[in-house]
Image: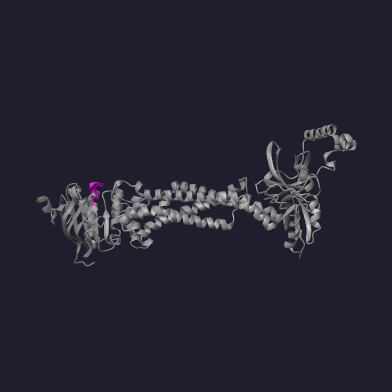
Amino acid sequence: MNDDVLAIETRGISKTYGAGHTEVVALCDASVAIPRGRTVALLGPSGAGKSTFLMAVGLINPPTTGQIAIGGVPVLDGPVALVNLRRFRRKHIGYVFQKSNLIPFLSARENVQVALELNGAPARQARRRAMELLDELGVAPRAENTPAMLSGGEQQRVAIARALANRPSVILADEPTAALDSHRGRQVMELFRDVAHRHGAAAIVVTHDHRTLEVFDAIYQMEDGTITGGLALPTDAYSSP
Amino acid sequence: MNLAVKDIQHNLGRFALTVLGIGMLLMIVMGMGGIYRGLVEDATLLLERIGGDLWVVQRDTRGPFAEISRVPRTLAHRLLAVPGVQSAREFVFHTIQRQHEGRPLRMSVLGLSWPQDKGQWLPLVAGRPLAQNHFELIADKTLGLRLHERIQLGKETYTVVGVTSGMASTAGDGMIFVTVWDAQVIQFDAPGEAIRLERAAREHRSRTEDIFLHQPLLAEQLARPTADLPAAASPELSAVVVRIAPGANQEKVASTIASWSDVSVFTKAGQGELLLKGMVDKSRRQLGMFRTLLTIIAAVVMSLILYTLTLDKLHSIALLKLIGAPNRTILGMILQQAIVLGAVGYGIAYLVGQKVFPHFPRRVVLTNEDLLRLAIIVLGISVISSVLGIWKAMRAAPNDALMG
């Protein structure tokens, strides 16, 4: 992907569930344009549509209408996929969700390694890279433990390592620090920012943790399925909520 | 990284129990096939071992293995006079059940045509063939009789001089081999009281019927032992086994014998076919149907197990899809587990079967051909039974990973 193109661009995406009198509009005309190397926070109350937006941008749950382009490549036109979504996710998108979502029958290392191997990395190389990431996130000593043997925070760090494994151009995180203490939470946010800056990736992080907002390059606000805040510097976000 | 193996390792205990259950089920399927083979072998073994070319039996009967056949002892001599007949051996075959050492002992008695046949053709695992024409027997090891053990049959005591292996009747009863004379003595043994009653009846007839009153000498004859009575028929044979002389035309010999109105003739193949199509066929079909049902049950059980295993992994499968795993990775994981389940189950069935089958009351014969066929069937079942799990896995959506 070229450096001068937007990492994430959405144009008027909407998501509607149900029809007629049961119709629920979860996302309404949401448009964003996030350059490479930027880390963006997505704020908003529960039910505002943050997760729906993240799932649409993450190519997990396509929008009802609107277009999404990743790294300048049009990937979705409404619900219509323009590329192989699974392959695109594997190569370009890293996910971290509120629940750690690790594979229970794999160890911490294998959970990271599997993402690399699925992307074509040789086993030995994938193993080394997995260990590097776990070390970077401070969970290397627990590399051979299965998720059930890890604390919530450790699980979340393993999930973050997996999200970063393939050096994605887009990192999507839904309240990734909810299970972490403030110190670890801040570390993780800084890690997202560093990865985004170093690798020219864009990160969208849904968070309620206002203590870490200064880490972000910009903040979006959502309410009732609509992005209301627009791209703004963190200081602006605080001064005009 | 092999996800199938990782999942199995993670749930090793449960997988081991599951595979053990499948293995036991497959062992029963395997055993059914082995019992069928044993049935066929038992049925044809005697025919093969005795090695006659023609079986001459009572007219309109199907021979001693299928039903009661009685032919006179003189038949053997008549047959020897037919051109092309090299030898004619008397054959007596019947099944008895006696108490021995406090337990019922069921055995098939086969009379050997002494002195031509001393049982040299029997597969002896201990001892020797018969060396005298009375009171010796050769027993199959399934009867549990030991070498030199003495056993009471009727009024006589017989000594076990030889032990064979794998000699059982079509009913699965172990066989004993004695001379034809002894076989008939065992067959027609009557208790003393029965003989006394029969003699008293004869005496009563001699006093009441006119013929004896007019001819007292006849009445004297009636007082003699049954075996000495000229009017009483001597014990009969079950069949006569004929061997054709080298170069003689078997069909011609058979046709000559068949023209006699008191006997029927079967070739060895014909007798074998009668055995297989008669009494063995029903058991064979019964076993075949049972085996088919068990195979279907095994397939259903394996399907359900694989479906359940897939359901347990549905979240992981959705997660794998979320991080971009292609369908072939997920399909491969389920398919590999199905094949491992089938293959290990088959291995357990084989290994446990090897230990268990010899203790079955009937012979279980596992042929390489049957084992290979079952292996292919198990492979097929494994693949087919994974379809339900694969179908469920393919329906899992990536966003399912984010729910619950």
In which quadrant is the N terminus of chain A drawn?
bottom left
Between B280 and B323, the one lying in front of the other is B280
Question: Is residue B1 among the parts visible in the rendering?
Answer: no
In terms of depth relative to the viewer, which is nearer, B144 or B29? B29
| Quarter occupied by residue A38 | bottom left
- In this rendering, the answer to whether A32 lies above or below B402 is below
Question: Residue A195: percent from the left, percent from the top?
Answer: 24, 59
Percent across and percent down for residue B248 are: 76, 64
The residue closer to the viewer here, B349 or A237, is: B349
Left or right, residue B182 beside residue A150: right
For the image, the number of numbered tags is: 0
Q: Position of residue B166 (x, y in %)?
A: 67, 50
Front residue of B74/B1: it is B74
The magenta segment is: A174-183
Note whether residue A55 is visible.
yes
* Left or right: A202, with A106 as reference point: left
Magenta region includes residue A178 = yes
Magenta stretch, main secondary structure class: loop
Left or right: B44 with respect to A213?
right
Q: Is residue B93 magenta?
A: no
| x and y, in percent, of residue A170 in the image | 24, 59
Residue A69: quarter of image: bottom left
